[in-house]
Image (cartoon, helix red, strand yellow):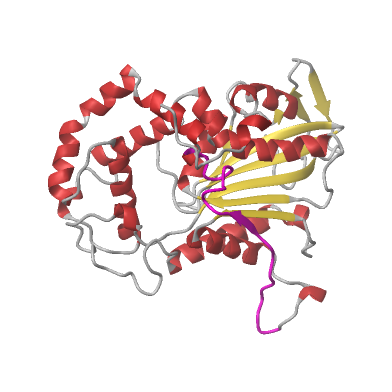
Amino acid sequence: MEWTTSGKLLAYWVLLIGSGSILTLEAADQPQLKLVSVVFRHGDRAPDPVEMFPKDPYYKYSFYPVGLSGLTNEGKLREYQLGKLLRKQYNDLLGDVYLPDSVLARSTDYKRTKMSLQLVLAALYPPKGLQVWNKQLNWQPIPMTYETPDRDWLMIPEECPEYLEERKKTESLPEIQAKIESIQGFLKNLTELTGKNFTIPNDIYNLYHILIAESYMGLAIPQWTRGIFPHGKLLDGINLEYEMFSYSEAQRRLNGGKLLFNILEEMVAIKEGRSDKTRKMQLYSGHETNVAAVLQTLGIYKPHVPEYTSAVIVELYELNARYFVKVFYYLGIPSTLVVQKIPGCEVLCPLDKFLDLLKNVIPSKDELACDKTKKSTN
């Protein structure tokens, strides 16, 4: 039997505590959901300029009216549905009335991620009662924040020089070099098929994402992709890129570890009574790289490409002065929530044990910020 997000207990619970002792909880003991943190990908989008290739049949398309890399109507709907799911899942925690500072809403500085965050917030907090300000518009404004890419070390950490140095170390490893060498023939074939020079796994990464974007828009993609996309050699190639993305412990610490630091910092503050008691939810609207990086840092990533609107959801519970963490992975496509088990812990993981298990991949405060104007020394 598992904990439900509503926190109801139907019978007796037997929880294994980190020390190995057993605590039996009667049905009258109600666990309290204290905080929910969500790291999610933007919705479906049009192709991005960096992904375009000369032999793409849509190479000259403007993708009017959304524009290149713009959020499509399907993407907007999918993000709104994510907000509806979060509202249904956490209705008791959030309450009907939006209160200032009850939700931290952070995005990267991209139109598609900022729009995605606005759509989630719109579904999460439709105005009720005194907050209805226009009877013809079931919406209310909710503040959100973002940093420009050159200053965003939290959600675009892969551009920090310290991370880039670790990435270069990974790329030079014999086992990684062997994998890159093994796909050189395939990269050469892709160069001929696309009219664009393919030399590294990141080139496959960009190709995979443009094909996903076009296929989700209902556009016909080139015949030569059959048998290699969405499964096959293109998937193998992009999975290699994701493997290199957080291959080492240092990479995980400097990548997904930064978002986890923020999430865990608020959890610890709640446990120690230092938190703003109105904070109920933390939303981070980003990219599939953010979702993958957090999964990798948690040790629960399996090779795949995180779908549009996919999300890592981290819950904090309090029960009898003890705190527990539960993690879900929202697949996005399909709209399915999958409970996760952190390696070395139970599904309901005591917070102290959770922190201990992740101690090597959570950055120190000195490792958080970075100067992106500084060049890598490697």
Magenta span covers which residues? 135-158
> Percent from the top left, x then y, of residue 44?
43, 59
Q: Is residue 232 visible?
A: no
Going 26% across and 41% down the picture, which residue do you hit?
234
Decide which of 250, 238 is in the foreground and name it: 250
Q: Is residue 369 magenta?
A: no
At 81% from the left and 39% from the top, the residue drawn is 270
- What residue is rendered at 59% in x and 28% in y? 342
Residue 251 x %, y %? 50, 29
Is the N terminus in the top left, top right, bottom left or bottom right quadrant?
Answer: top right
Residue 181 in sight from this viewpoint: yes
Within the magenta stretch, is there residue 145? yes
Q: Quadrant of residue 129?
A: bottom right
Quadrant in the rendering for residue 121: bottom right
Q: Foreground residue, 69 or 282?
A: 69
Q: Quadrant of the C terminus?
A: top left
Q: Main secondary structure of the magenta part?
A: loop
Q: Is residue 23 left or right of residue 152?
A: right
Relative to 44, does residue 185 appear above or below in the rendering?
above
